[in-house]
Image (cartoon, grey):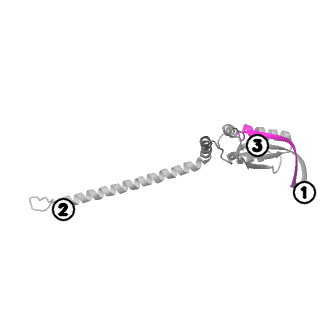
Amino acid sequence: MRFFCKAGRTLGMTFVATSRMEWLFQRGSKEAVFLSVCRSMLLISCLLLVLSVSMYPGLQSIGVQLHSAVTGSYVPGHHSVLLVNSPNKQAAKDIGRAIMEKRLAASINILSRTSTMYYWNGEIQDASEVLMLVKTKTSRIQEVIEYVRSVHPYENPEVLSFPVEDGSLAYMKWMDEVIPDD
């Protein structure tokens, strides 16, 4: 299609050029929109990654609870039992009560007078100790260890943890309810 003006010039070129410029502008806008969407998606993905990493312990706990609720099974290793030796019953009770007050454990058993042999300063020692069984979430072990080390009368207290592989689902659900998430 050609348009003529009074001077007899063809105006069709102007029409074609205008259409081509509009097409280039639209194409440029589409590319700009595409790049903007890509940048936004990248930003959102990065934010979600940072939030996921920072909230990992809480998300893990929720995931374990959902898994248990849906499948009716236990996720091995979600809970642990710590062994802690003390020199006497009173020290064990004091440490145990403080752990419970800090809500770092669901339950603590104090087993009186165990016979213990160990190396200390190059010699075999034979002693009588009190053993504590501390039942907690695996995610709280480091807090328990740090606390025990800060108040224990021994220079190097025994604190060993063992993951719970299986057990009473009702008991472990109760443990989840009484030990807050970190």
Toward the viewer: 31 or 8? 31
* Residue 28 on image: x %, y %: 33, 57
* Residue 70 on image: x %, y %: 59, 42
Badge 2 marks a residue whose secondary structure is: helix
* Residue on which the image places disc 3: 134
Q: Is 6 on the left or on the right of 154, as rendered? A: left
Do residues under tags 3 and 2 come within 8 Å of each other at their CB atoms?
A: no
Residue type, label 3: Val
In what quadrant of the picture does the N terminus appear? Answer: bottom left
In what quadrant of the picture does the C terminus appear? Answer: top right
Determine the residue positioned at 26% across, 56% down: 22
Question: Marks 3 and 1, how far apart in space?
Answer: 29 Å
Mark nearest the camera among 3 and 2 is 3
Toward the viewer: 86 or 152? 86
* Residue 156 on image: x %, y %: 81, 51
Q: Which residues are magenta?
A: 98-122
* Residue on which the image places disc 2: 13
Mark earlier in primary sequence (3, 1): 1
* Residue on which the image places disc 1: 123
Residue 104: image quadrant is top right
Residue type, label 2: Met
Magenta span includes 106: yes
Mark nearest the camera among 3 and 1 is 3
Mark earlier in primary sequence (3, 2): 2
Badge 3 marks a residue whose secondary structure is: strand
* Residue 160 on image: x %, y %: 77, 50
Determine the residue positioned at 78% across, 47% down: 83
Residue type, label 1: Glu
